[in-house]
Structure formats: structure tokens, C-alpha cells
Image: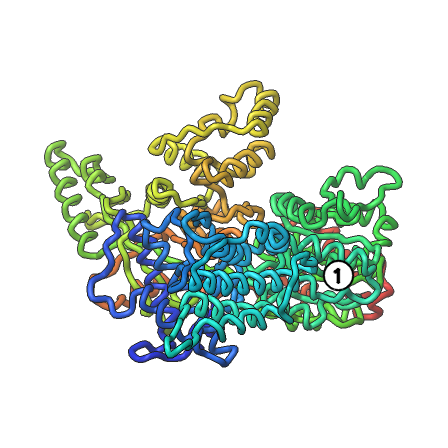
Amino acid sequence: MFDTETSRILRSAPNVPGLDAENIPAILTAHYARLISNRLAGNSTPPENELWPPSRIADTYEIVTALQSDDELRKSAAFVAATAHLIAAKGDASIAGRSYYVDRNSVDPTLAAALLFLAAEQYADASESVVDFNVLDETQTLEARVIAEGVVDLASGRLTEIVRRASRWRSEKSQSYDLQELALIALLDTLIVGIELLAEKLTGEVLEAPINFQSPRHAFQRVLELSAQINDRVLYTYTGPSHLASLLMATYDGICEAGITAIPPPTGADHNFWQQWVRFRAIRYPYVWPNHRVAINKGFHQTGVSAVVVLPTGAGKTTVSSVKIAGVLARKKKVIFLAPTHALSDQLTVDLQETFPKDLLGSVVSSDFDLLFQEDAQLREIEVMTPERCLAMLSFAPEAFKEVGLLVFDECHLLSPQSGKIRRSLDGMLCVLAFRHLVPDLDYLFLSAMLENSQEIAEWIGAVISRECLSIDLLWKPSRQARGVVIYQQEELTKTAGLSEKLQAAGDVKVGKLSKGLRASAQSALKLTPWAIWGLQHNWLQSKSNIAHCTFTPLLSGKVDLTGGLNKRRQVYFKPNANKVSSRLAATAAQQGMKTIVFVNTKNDAVSVAKEITSGNKKGIVYSDEEEQRFSQLKIELGSLEHSLLAETGSAVPHNSSMFKLERDLAERLFKRPDGADVIVATPTLAQGLNLPAQLAILAGDKRANSDSKGRESLEAHEILNAAARAGRAGHLANGVVLLVPEPVISFSSGKPLSADVVAKLQSVLPEDDRCVTITDPIQSILDQLTVGAIVDSDTRYLINRLATIKKLVQMNPIGFSI
């Protein structure tokens, strides 16, 4: 569940009696996997005699955080406590919708969890921890409510709301004649001042309210000093404010240097443009994630610096690239953003338009390729396009690219030629080399989640462009997935197979001849209870040498229908029936209110599985005016909505490349709505372009039909990883779940170690590591790929010849070639 860097942080927490911190990632993953399984199975009974339930871990490490003076140990303890708090809260249905509280004696555990996540610099978790709670409790003092609102806004990144509220709430301050209540109000007031000062520091906004403290930490420290006093031999204690002050001090230490407004502009940038942009971003995204700060501290955003940035999927590649892009725009230069697919180009265009709004900055983000082929075409400030389109434009109007200051290449691991993708690799490489000639002082930014040898590629790029190229390869990510594989109990499988064989034999006797396939009665008996095997460390099962470090949980309270056949000895064997099983899991998740993405292998499967889920989960969706308008446009396009793949919109919607763009857009909108579709069914080829975070991602199979051999071939590792990454997404959902339905069916024996056969099957279907693509020499690797007998068309052969010529010219004179 936790990436290797996050696991390291958890393991670095102090040991406590009876709990070795080395085991914390595995324990927390097991708790989360059990939580999800219980939710799907409708079971809320906790395990009996559990030594370290989430609540005990949370309370223990919250105390450790409050008492710890070492910054790193405090950060790790805070992360352990907060994660355990969040798991405990998700497992307690009674707290949904209740109000937060801050009183003399205690602090709401959810508020504590939010501050602990902030202290650990886990911003996505902090935001998720407060998303479902109500802060308006009229029985509390105004100061207590403002404190709760302030903590929620800190966790959600709404710091400007804190600054704006500072000038309003004091006009309604609570009144009391009780000295102890007045003391509580005064302590809470001081904590509010500290929160407001922290918001001011991180946003660059100016507080209008009078402030009597030098810094946020000064205010929090003062509360800590005053919350326990001896007066006339009587001890007055205010443990709630005291504990809250210690948590806020830890929060301040964790995030005080994380503000986006603190990023210095690159050399040559217009300072006014830069400040306007960072203050705009601070309204919604005030915090700079730890991995992004590493890249910034290395100077990747500086003028004249190129970089290869490798971050896990969901770790904010587009977000960190926006810092580099902003610096380029601030120098009055333009940006080309290459994306390998049209779906990803569309999504990036929307994201970049939100990041660089025209009405504020005057910058235009465009993906309207056809306009570029007009005479005297002018590039917009940011152009998003595929390498193929870019290469065509470079040939048509190279002079239009003279003002480009940055080339961003997303998913740059595609420069490594893979089966059937040689042309894309060629186009991408030709774009890079063409820009080297057309704009010699251009900066390059290569982005990937799967590149294994970033240092080698950075050195190669540096040699080609004759300038510095950084390698920034970071494993930390702000979101995570518990990854499981659907598996079945061997005992039940054997029993079910025996029953099916008896029914088969009875049918054969009745008819008087042997059937080649399973009879209907024998097929109907193939019902099994699905379980999941969960890896308790990073990735599905950590490594081949540690595959036994896992746990098993039942997924559903009922059984699912598998299919099967007969071998030569008339024995029944099972087939995974991946679409049906995935449909059942998704339908159950939808009933539990879990947003789910199902990935299927074909476009037709996307439609049929969505229909099946909807048929068992009828849901009427009231369309918004904008959606009604889009349906009207779709009706004009098709003549009738009955021809649309969204004609039977309900709890599930399909999403594939055969749909009109208008249909795909509608499907995405309906899925994003809290009261819209609960499930979206898509093909893996669209995974890169889907910015639709879900609580659960189901991969219906790890294989697909091979059109050449007419057999089955495994999905590539990057396809599985891209699809899995849709579960959980920083800024939306910090934690997600991935379930893979493998082919063939895999079983386990209760209470026994996994057999060598099962281990081998699991190893064959699971990506061993997220870093799964290695590029040696991008030019030579393409040429080598083409020498092994690949069949290419005449157009590609032309490009091959040009590439071979370019390679020779680059070797002789890196800036002397032309396209």
C-alpha cells in the first residue's frame, strides 16, 4: 500500500512497547484491506482480541508526536498516528456527519488527524480526513467553531478563507462572566491568531486583524505555557487547548517552509507575473509537496536548465511542470507540451487552462491543431499536442516555433520503442532533435512515472543539447493504493469442481453420450466466494523473494459465477469470467457508495459491462442544465439518443475511444458528480487520459486477445500500472484500492503457505516494480528495434532513413543537422 519512501517514513517512527515500528506499514495495510473487504462484504465486526487496532495505534503515536522534540521522529510518529486515525474513522459509520469539537478537556480525533497529517507533510491525506464532517455546532463557543473551521481550512488548503474570516469573526466574540470559561476562550483565541498568522505566511495575504504575536509558533507556544497554571495551590488545566497547541506547533514545523509563494522566480522572469501566478495558485494549492520541493531546490525550474523528472503516477508530474512553465511564460516565451494520446492531450489542456487562466494571466492554452496549419499561424502561449501533430507542424511552419522556450514531453518512456509503437517513438525522437536545431537555447522537461534509468537519459540529453540536464527520480507520492488480487479457496474450488463433474456425468448418462463442453447444469454449479490476497508492503506483493508477506480477506458475502471447461480426463477446470466477476464487485461497491472504475479489454466490453452493472443497480440521475444541453447536442449529432452509448445512463457509464468526444465528456461529468454514476467502465488504452480518481479500480483480466497469434497475450506492465493509478488521486482521494482479476484462476489453501505453483502464477501477472521501462540510447534503440524484422509502412521507412541520417549528423556535429 505504501511506496518505499513512505514506508521508510513510517518505519522510522519510534518503537513503543509491544510494537516494532518495522511492522507498521504491514499492520496499517492489513487494517485498510480488511476495512475495504468488510465494506464490500457488508461485515462490520472487528477481529477479536486484536492487540493493535487502529484506535490504539492512533492514540499511542499521537502522544509520541506531542512529546517528541526530534523533527524527523515527530514527523514519522505524526504520520503513523494520523493514518491510524483515518482508518479507524472510515471503519466507524457512526461519526459520519457529526460535528467536530474542541473543548477544555479534549480535541476531536478527526481534527487531530488532520493536523497530524499536515505535520507529516501528507497534504492529500489531510484533505481527505476532513471531507465528510460538519464543523457547525451551535452548542460550542464561537471560538471553538472558528478553531474547527480553521483546522479544516488548513487541511483543505483553503488558507485564504482563514485570512478573510479573520476580519469578520471577532465582531461576534463570545461573552462570559465565568472566569474558567473566559480563560478557555482566551486560549482558543490565541490559537486562532496563530492559525491566521500561518495562513498569512503561506499565502502572501495581509491580515487586517490586530496581531500581538511575532510568529505562529510564538502564539502556539504561549497557549502551551498558559494551559496549565497553579493559582492558590489549585492546578488549573486546559488539556484540550494544550494538546491542540502541541499539534499546531508540530503542524507549523512541518509546513512553514512549504508555501508556494516562497518559490523564487527563475532568472529573467518578470517578477510581477510570477507573483501574480503563485498567489493565484495559493488560493487552491498553497502547499508545495515534499517531492516537488526537492525538484525546485535542485533548480529544475531555472532558466537554461533541462530535466528528466520521474515521479510515480499520482505524484504530481503536471503540477510540478507548471512551476517550470510559469517561469517560461514569465520570460515571455511559449511552451509546447507533448502528450502521447489525444485523450491525455484533452485532459492536459483542461488542467493547464485551470492552472494558467486567460482572464488572469492573459495566457492561452490551446490544443486546436487545425488552426496551426493556417497561413501565418501563431502559436498560443501553451500548445498541447501529440508528437505526430508536432512533427507535422514542424515540417509545415518551423518558423512558428522560434519563440518556444520549453518543450515538455509527458510519458517520455514512450521514446523506448515497444511492439506496435515504433512510429510513436520515431515521431517523438524526431521532435526532440528538430527542436534542438530550431531553438538551440530551448529548455527540455521529460516526464515519466515508469522510466528506470533516468540518470542515463539525462546524460544523453545533456550531450545532445550541450547543456545541463538534471535527473530527478523520486519514489514518494501523496496517494497510495492497497493492491489485491482476486483469488479463491482451494477447498471450495475442489468441492465445486466435484459437484460440477457429477452434474456433467449425470447429464451425459441422461442424454446417452459424452458432451465436449460443460453442460448447462454443470456450468451453473461453478459458483465460488471471491477472496483477495493483499500485499502488505509496496506494490502487490513487494518482491519475488518476499511474496508470502500478505494477507487474505473475503471480498463478498455471496458467490460469483465462474465459467469452466473439461480437460482430456473429463475433469472440470475454471476460467476467471473476469468481466462478470468485475461487474459483480463494481455493483456491490456502488451499493456501498464507492466510486469505481472498471478496466476491460475491448470497447464492446466497456459497453456491455456498464449495461450489466446498471441493470442490477437502477439509479435515476437528474441531469443539470449543462448536461441536458449536451444531450441535446448529442441528439442532433446522432438523430436520436437511442443510438448513443449513454442511452441507458444509470449507475454505470461506458468510456471508450469509439464514443463521440461529447459522449466521453458526458460520461466523465456524470461519474465526477457525487450523485451521478457510481461506476465508469473503460479500456486500458484510455487510462492515461482519465483524470477520474476513484476509491476502487478493478482490472478485469491481465490478458487480451492477440490478433496475430489468435491466442492470449499479457497486458504490458505500464498498462496495468496506469490503470491501477486511477485508484486514489492526490487532491481528490488520498487512498484507493486496486483489485486485479487474473487469468488463469488462482487458488490458495487456508492456513497453509502459498504453493510454488501459486507463487509462480502471481509472479507472472503482477508488475514487480513501477519503474518498468529502460531506455538505452533512444535513437539506437529505435534502430535496433527495426532490425529484428518489424513490418513497417512506407511512410515509417522514410522516417527510419531520416533518423539514421540524423544519428550520423548528430554524432558528427550536434547542431549541424536539419530536418
Please state the horizontal and vertical placement of residue 735, each as a whole percent of the image: 45, 56
Q: In which quadrant will I find the N terminus?
A: bottom left
* Residue where numbered disc 1 is placed: 804
Q: Secondary structure at mark 1?
A: helix
Q: Between 510 and 361, which is closer to the camera in this rendering?
A: 361
Q: In which quadrant will I find the C terminus?
A: bottom right
Q: Between 281 and 312, which is closer to the camera in this rendering?
A: 281
**Amino acid type indicated by mark 1:** Ala
Determine the residue positioned at 64% across, 73% down: 455
Pick out the residue farthest to the top. Answer: 639
Please state the horizontal and vertical placement of residue 121, each as a whole percent of the image: 53, 66
Query: Which of the 4 image quadrants contains residue 313?
Result: bottom right
Please state the horizontal and vertical placement of residue 261, each as a whole percent of the image: 69, 62
Residue 544 showing in the rendered view: no
* 789 on left or right of 26: right
Query: Which of the 4 image quadrants contains residue 505?
Result: top left
Residue 193 showing in the rendered view: yes
Determine the residue positioned at 24% across, 58% down: 46
Counting every numbered tag in the picture gives 1
Please state the horizontal and vertical placement of residue 376, each as a whole percent of the image: 89, 41
* 157 on left or right of 594: right
591 w.r.t. 411: above or below: above
* 40 on left or right of 242: left
Q: Between 610 and 265, which is closer to the camera in this rendering?
A: 265
Determine the residue positioned at 57% across, 51% down: 169
376 w.r.t. 762: above or below: above
702 w.r.t. 814: above or below: above
Determine crowd level at label 1: few under 14, some 14-19, many 20+ residues with C-alpha closer than 10 A.
Answer: some
